[in-house]
């Protein structure tokens, strides 16, 4: 039986290039960062010109764009922040995402018509806090990752505004991602977008008088990590979340590549389609989980929302990146002469290997590369990063195709 659900799928984008992939792979909305005042300020992000172009591109395809302004604002930044908001007012953004009460109040004063969403950084754990944000004028609240499902249901019953939850991606440790380790170990403040990811470094214990003798912090010959969290994956529980009345499902990953964003967006779009069609059953769920395995990720967890015991959250021994597939190429253009795509190589691959091709709104395509040609039409046995190559005979495929090869 088909079900009527109207849940927004919200995907991340670190630049204009990735935004286009997110929009084409089924995102209803994309959240991005500018060059200032957001929590991913180390790499990438949008200039004002790129942001305007990205919004226009997304809107032509019926996709919304939200701008993150979720950094904690320092006193001497207030004037500069106000100037930045004046520039942003010229862009047709669908909402801004904030966590700092001062940022919230300044935006309400300078740009009263823009919808405001509350970031998970605000640590919203209960309906009283949700409704207070609503009274202040917030259109949506992203709940803290620490909220269990039973509490989510109660919050939904009492909420006076839209509710958003994370369904996939990294779970930064400390309440909703506010990490002290980065600031105090490297001087880079996670609350101001400069997280050094110190929680994922490897640590050993050294005794003061024995400077060359190192001991693992716990008895593990590989060392240990502090707060080395797994990756959230609520795919198997998506129907329960949909039934709860949540307005938006959010994917974490504004530092990720087009490969990651495309694949995860494709998977959760397909999952929502299955729920609508009454086809969200074990076999289809397992197929989608298998697809998620085709991009780099840490061990998955149901997180605070659904985990049956804290052991899953606390036992992070040997939690590291799993790489079962290699992201090897993206599409540049189509070659009529060779009846195949011209590709930009990301990672090495060879003639004779089987490539797994992901395309928007289609099932993955398997293709064995009989030949690889350079741009002059000469045969190549091996394609290397940054090469431009032709795959003859593959035919026409989407210009947003992602090429993966199973790791040996």
Image: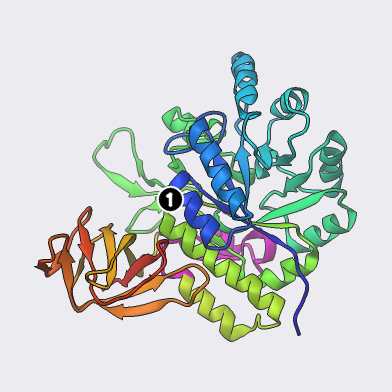
**155 relative position to 71: left or right:** right
Q: Is residue 59 above or below residue 291?
A: above
How far across and how far down the image is residue 97, in percent? 66, 39
Residue for point 39% across, 57% down: 219
Residue for point 44% across, 51% down: 256
Residue for point 23% across, 76% down: 369
Which residue reaches farthest front? 336
How far across and how far down the image is residue 75, in percent? 64, 16
How far across and how far down the image is residue 166, in percent? 64, 55
Closer to the camera in the image, 20 or 171 = 20
Mark yes or no: residue 243 visible.
yes
Residue at label 1?
Answer: 225
Picture quadrant where residue 377 is located: bottom left
Closer to the camera in the image, 398 or 238 = 398
How far across and how far down the image is residue 303, in percent? 62, 61
Q: Write down the region rendered in magenta.
A: 292-320
């Amino acid at each position: 039986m088909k079900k009527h659900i109207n849940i927004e799928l919200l995907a991340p984008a670190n630049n204009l290039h990735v935004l286009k992939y997110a929009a084409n792979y089924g995102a209803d909305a994309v959240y991005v960062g500018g060059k200032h005042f957001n929590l991913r300020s180390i790499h990438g992000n949008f200039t004002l010109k790129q942001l305007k172009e990205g919004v226009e591109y997304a809107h032509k395809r019926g996709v919304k764009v939200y701008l993150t302004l979720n950094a904690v604002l320092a006193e001497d930044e207030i004037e500069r922040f106000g100037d930045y908001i004046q520039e942003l007012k010229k862009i047709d953004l669908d909402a801004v995402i904030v966590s700092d009460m001062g940022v919230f109040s300044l935006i309400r004063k300078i740009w009263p018509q823009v919808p405001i969403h509350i970031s998970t950084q605000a640590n919203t754990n209960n309906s009283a806090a949700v409704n207070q944000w609503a009274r202040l004028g917030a259109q949506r609240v992203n709940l803290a990752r620490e909220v269990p499902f039973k509490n989510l249901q109660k919050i939904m019953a009492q909420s006076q505004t839209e509710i958003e939850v994370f369904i996939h991606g990294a779970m930064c440790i400390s309440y909703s991602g506010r990490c002290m380790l980065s600031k105090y170990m490297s001087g880079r403040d996670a609350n101001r977008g400069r997280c050094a990811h110190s929680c994922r470094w490897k640590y050993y214990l050294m005794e003061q008088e024995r400077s060359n003798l190192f001991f693992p912090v716990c008895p593990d010959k590989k060392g240990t990590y502090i707060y080395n969290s797994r990756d959230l994956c609520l795919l198997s529980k998506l129907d329960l979340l949909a039934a709860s009345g949540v307005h938006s499902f959010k994917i974490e990953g504004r530092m990720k590549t087009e490969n990651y964003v495309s694949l995860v967006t494709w998977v959760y779009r397909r999952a929502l389609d299955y729920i609508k069609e009454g086809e969200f059953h074990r076999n289809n769920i397992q197929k989608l989980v298998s697809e998620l395995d085709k991009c780099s990720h840490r061990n998955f967890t149901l997180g605070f929302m659904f985990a049956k015991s804290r052991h899953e959250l606390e036992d992070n021994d040997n939690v590291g990146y799993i790489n079962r597939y290699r992201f090897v190429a993206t599409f540049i253009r189509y070659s009529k002469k060779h009846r195949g795509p011209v590709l930009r190589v990301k990672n090495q691959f060879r003639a004779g290997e089987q490539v797994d091709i992901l395309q928007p709104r289609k099932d993955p395509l398997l293709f064995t590369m009989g030949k690889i040609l350079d741009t002059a039409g000469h045969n190549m046995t091996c394609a290397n990063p940054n090469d431009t190559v032709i795959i003859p005979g593959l035919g026409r495929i989407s210009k947003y195709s992602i090429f993966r090869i199973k790791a040996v």
